[in-house]
Amino acid sequence: MSRRTDAARPRVAVIGAGSWGTTFGKILADGGANVMMWARRPELASEIQEGKRNSEYLPGINLPRTMHATHHLSEALDGAEQVYLSIPSQAVRQNLKAVRPLVSRTDVPIVSLMKGVERRTGLRMSQVIEQELHCDPARIAVASGPNLALEIAREQPTAAVISSTSQETADAVARRARNAYFRTFVNTDVIGTEFGGVLKNLIAVAIGIVDGVGYGENTKASIITRGLVEMTDFAVAFGAHPETLQGLAGLGDLIATCQSPLSRNNTAGRLLGQGYRFDDVVKQMNQTAEGLASVAPVLQLAREVGVDMPIVEQVKMVLDGTMNPRDIAPHLTTDDDTPKGERTQNGQAGGGGALWRSIQRALDQFRHGGRGAAGDRP
């Protein structure tokens, strides 16, 4: 490809060159963008720039020629028409302090690829971005969905949701972040989209724990089903639309994260279930498992709005070392021993077909590219 052709492509920046940041850079490049990655380590930037590889995080994947990299933040952001952030959630605020002066005089969209809440404040990533960059929330978008990085880097087809309070911003980002193997839908429910990405990690840790213990598919199916109820109850209490949790950012991401060995949160849970202590699990993980850091702040937020989350409570007890992982399963899917109706995602008793309808909508998005959850539209 000639320099002239390369220069004609729209320029975007991706801040963070881990597995997901690099994969999203590939998505953007394959969709027609000229991508500049920012890597904290010079040697990683050099490997992406010169070798078109990221062997540490995406072994065996060849990156497009239109992907470049630098460890200089100013160079990465220079001339970017859109900025994508892929930084561990607990380090995002500090990194944004350096980003702020470089984007303060622009109105480019800022897109969060992160799925976590800040431990100290309980804030979602879009809220941290708004605070630290002092920018209009209409400029901020978030991306979420069943997006296991290595599968997408191998160009296996999937879909995601781009969400912003501004329909214009969501549409602009969705048009840029799509290609032959990556389809994007849009909605304006930022709260539901972000919390779906956060909460499914916690359920995936629970699935990993019972898998590590040796429990079977019945146990895991029960946790996934009741986990979706917990996720929806929590998100709706903070203003989310229940339909969002029935779409790609909720149910879709939950299924992918819970059932795949590529999931970092599932892997972390499995190590806990096998008897490893929390500190040992953190040391063994090559990358951040956001669910481990999000358990405590999510439970604090749940208590503030009076939402019961028995699955997440039990996960915390295992993390704290106050519960044997083998003792977790009988307690995971109920608050207490009092018989009660099976609630739907809206927190209502009855309506037994609601779960199936939500599953059907998510599957329809994959099979037909049609309208899935209300508000998630192409």
Image (cartoon, rainbow, N blue to C red):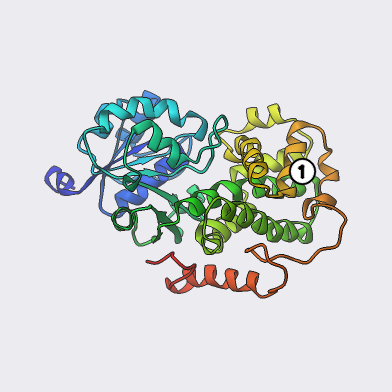
Along the viewing direction, whichever of 172 and 179 lies nearer the viewer: 172
The image quarter containing residue 225 is: bottom right
Quadrant of the image containing the C terminus = bottom left
Q: What x and y, as percent, mark residue 269?
A: 69, 42
Along the viewing direction, whichever of 250 and 44 lies nearer the viewer: 250
Q: Is residue 253 left or right of residue 10?
A: right
The image quarter containing residue 327 is: top right
Q: What x and y, as percent, mark residue 110?
A: 33, 42
Q: Is residue 177 left or right of residue 360?
A: left
What residue lies at 41% left-to-right and 48% top-to-bottom? 142
Whether residue 16 is visible here, answered yes or no, is no
Along the viewing direction, whichever of 220 and 30 lies nearer the viewer: 220
**244 up-or-down from 116: above or below:** below
Q: Residue furthest left?
A: 4
Q: Secondary structure beneath disc 1?
A: helix
What residue lies at 30% left-to-right and 49% top-to-bottom? 29
Q: Mark 1 — residue?
A: 314
Whether residue 223 is visible here, answered yes or no, is yes
